[in-house]
Amino acid sequence: MKHFKTIFNVMKYGKKLSVAILTAMVVIAAASCQKKQSNSMTYRQLGNTGLKVSEISIGCGGFSKLDTAGSIELMTAAIDSGMNYIDIYDADPKTRSNIGAALKGRRDKMIIQGHIGTIFKNGQHTRTRDLEETKVGFEDLLKRLGTDFIEVGMIHITDSPEEWDELEGSPFLDYVFQLKKEGKIKHIGVSSHNAEVALTAAKSGWIEVIMFSLNPAFDRLRGGAIPWEKGAMENLQNGIDPVRVEFYDYCATHNIGVTVMKTFGGGGRLLDEKTSPLGVAYTPEQCIAYCLAKPCISTCILGIDNMEELIADLHYLHATEEEKDFKSVAKAGSGDDLGQCTYCNHCSPCPQGIPIAKVNELADKALVQGLDDELRAEYEALPHHASECTHCGNCLSRCPFGVNIPEKMDETAALFGK
């Protein structure tokens, strides 16, 4: 009944919504009342934090464009859909106050990922590492949200190795640790668009959650490039960047939570063939499925500006497997990748525990540069090997690039003798 109450309120608030959208809302509300797993939210572990988060979650951007009543309606619909995770990076007092009003009386319904090092300065959201500014910004966040703590304290945007190095031993980082000690944040995270920084953070031993920009286009960025660097999106490589592969694999094997930003490419670029860096258009369902296929991913944080976008994104919950299938689109924009392993890890998990992407990576290195003692030692150190493949075929249905993985396992077993 609460779902239909939400629709009634939304109809009152959004009088200009089309009949089609309202009909879709009724369908989704009805589906949410059913007990079928295919039509309900799925929850995933957020790394080692002990938190279970909805695989689709909401960002803060839309709340800056709504008044208080509209914010309450959007939050109500998000919670009713099963979303229980929100990212709040914006330091705009209006945004924070709107979210605080929307969470009043139901703080326990949302796990908050709030950013540390964000302030509102000269009329705009600004990143800072200044200690006093940081303290003022964080205390303002708690006050406007009406809470004594947030679950994940996210160090805001660290996009270069130099910026990461500057964190070590800094008063800023000391303050972050102090917040955790005082219980004002329960877990420490960092947000980054740079794969090298993200990997370094994952290996730090003290980062528990990483917010990372991930989608089919960004996976092809070269090295430590970030999307808005000059020429970055015009010179995408064939195949997923090896640093990203290592990052995804490390987080999966070490149980570090990864929350996704830029699921649709930033501004929805991937949803339109004309703006897609890959030259093909993905649907929201395909973009979400692409991200969630990686074992390390906990949730996709979506920038939802209004009720119409929320309804469109929630379609993922009851979309067919055909609607979520990103493989055909990936192949269409793959160029020379078709039939070649890009080490993307979408084939995981293997029932036999074989780290398929890593096995393929080492095999390809051996074929290119020759099988030396170092490569052989790295291969033998793997927990499971290619020879353990049973040809069950589970991996074949998940490979975006049509790789004959069982055949590849046989070739690798022959190459390494194991």
Image (tube, helix red, strand yellow):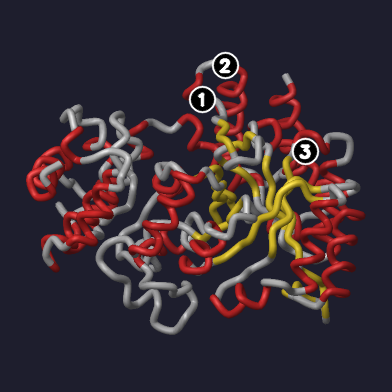
Rendered location of residue 385, percent (x, y): 23, 40
Asked if residue 96 lies left or right of residue 271, the reply is right
Whether residue 338 is situated above or below residue 228 in the rendered picture:
above
Residue for point 33% across, 46% down = 326
Q: Is residue 271 visible?
A: no
Report the residue marked by disc 3: 12
Task: Kindly indicate whether the residue at mark 2 contacts the one at mark 3 (C-beta within 8 angstroms).
Answer: no
For disc 1, the marked residue is 39
How far, Cα to Cα, is label 2 from label 1? 7 Å
Locate residue 274 relative to residue 254 in the image: left or right.
Answer: left
Instruction: Name the spot of residue 88 as percent of width and height, x first.
Output: 72, 56
Question: What percent of the width, then of the height, locates residue 353?
Answer: 32, 34
Secondary structure, mark 3, is helix
SS label for mark 1 = helix
Pick whichever of labels 3 and 1 is earlier in the sequence.
3
Q: Which mark is residue 68?
A: none
- Between 145 and 395, the one lying in front of the other is 395
Given the image, on which type of amino acid does mark 3 rest? Lys
Q: Residues within 10 Å of mark 3 (few under 14, many from 20)?
A: few
Q: Are marks 2 and 1 in contact (CB under 8 Å)?
A: yes
Which amino acid type is marked by label 1? Asn
The Cα atoms of the two marked residues, 3 and 2, are separated by 25 Å
Q: Residue at x 67, y 42 (%)?
A: 85
Front tag of 3 and 1: 1
Q: Residue at x 74, y 42 (%)?
A: 75
Residue 84 position within the rendered picture, expressed as x and y whole percent measured from the top left: 68, 37
Disc 2 target residue? 34
Q: Residues within 10 Å of mark 2 (few under 14, many from 20)?
A: few
Q: CA distance from mark 3 to mark 1?
A: 26 Å
Question: Helix, strand or loop at disc 2?
Answer: loop
